[in-house]
C-alpha cells in the first residue's frame, strides 16, 4: 500500500458535498468493518430492548381489562430476545388463539408485529449500509495514488558536460 495515500483526502471528481474520502490499509479497513458490524449489532439489540419495553408498557396501560391473551403477549415481549424471534412467537400465539373468541385478536397482534418488523427492517438496512462503507458507487474501492514524480520533465537547459553547439 506504499503507492497509495493513507488518510483523508478530497475526490474532486465528485460533487462538493460528496468529496470526502478516507483510505486505510487493508488490515485497518477490516478492523474498522468489524467494528461497524459490532456497533450495528449492539445498536439493534439496544433499540429492540427499548421498542419491546414501549410496546409492553402500551399493552399494560392502554387496555383496562387485560385478558389471558394480553398476559401472554406481555410475557412474550418481556422474554423476547430478537425482533425476528418475537415475530415468530407472536405468530404462534395468534395461531393458538385464533379459533377462540378473543376480541380483535388480529389487530392486537398487528399492534406488536408492525413496529417489530419495522425495527427489524431498519437493522437490516443499517447492516447493509455498514458493509457498503468499504466501496464506492461503482462497486469498487477508490484510493489516492501518491505523487512519485509524475509530470516532472527533465531540464532542457544545457548541462556543463554537454558543450555541443
Image: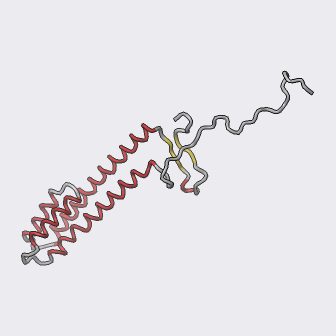
* Residue that lies at the very extreme toward the front in this rendered image: 164
- In the rendered image, residue 143, in percent from the top left (x then y), is placed at 54, 44
The type of colouring in the image is: secondary structure
Image quadrant where one finds the C terminus: top right
Q: Furthest-top residue in view?
A: 161
Q: Residue shown at 33%/57% (left/top)?
A: 124
Whole-percent x, y for residue 50 in the image: 25, 58
Q: How many marks?
A: 0
Tell me: residue 22, above or below residue 110.
Answer: above
Q: Is residue 105 left or right of residue 15?
A: left
- For the point 42% across and 37% down, which residue is it? 27
Q: Residue at x 20, y 67 (%)?
A: 58
Residue 60 quadrant: bottom left
Where residue 72 appears, x then y in whole percent? 10, 65
Q: State which quadrant residue 29 falls in.
A: top left
Q: Quadrant of residue 162?
A: top right
Q: Quick one: 140 or 86, which is closer to the camera?
A: 140
Does 41 sit left or right of 155 as displayed?
A: left
Between 140 and 97, the one nearer to me in the picture: 140
Q: What residue appears at the point 60 percent right and 53 percent down from the top-left corner?
A: 13
Q: Position of residue 123 (x, y in %)?
A: 32, 57
Q: Is residue 100 above or below residue 77?
A: below
Q: Is residue 19 left or right of residue 43?
A: right
Amino acid at each position: 500500500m506504499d503507492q497509495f495515500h493513507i488518510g483523508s483526502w478530497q475526490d474532486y471528481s465528485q460533487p462538493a458535498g460528496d468529496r470526502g474520502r478516507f483510505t486505510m490499509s487493508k488490515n485497518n479497513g477490516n478492523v474498522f468493518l468489524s467494528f461497524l458490524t459490532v456497533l450495528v449489532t449492539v445498536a439493534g439489540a439496544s433499540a429492540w430492548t427499548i421498542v419491546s419495553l414501549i410496546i409492553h408498557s402500551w399493552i399494560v396501560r392502554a387496555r383496562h381489562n387485560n385478558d389471558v391473551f394480553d398476559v401472554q403477549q406481555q410475557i412474550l415481549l418481556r422474554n423476547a430476545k430478537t425482533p425476528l424471534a418475537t415475530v415468530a412467537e407472536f405468530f404462534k400465539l395468534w395461531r393458538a388463539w385464533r379459533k377462540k373468541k378473543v376480541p380483535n385478536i388480529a389487530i392486537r397482534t398487528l399492534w406488536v408485529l408492525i413496529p417489530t418488523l419495522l425495527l427489524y427492517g431498519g437493522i437490516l438496512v443499517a447492516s447493509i449500509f455498514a458493509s457498503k462503507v468499504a466501496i464506492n458507487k461503482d462497486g469498487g474501492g477508490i484510493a489516492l495514488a501518491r505523487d512519485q514524480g509524475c509530470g516532472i520533465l527533465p531540464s532542457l537547459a544545457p548541462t556543463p558536460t554537454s558543450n555541443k553547439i
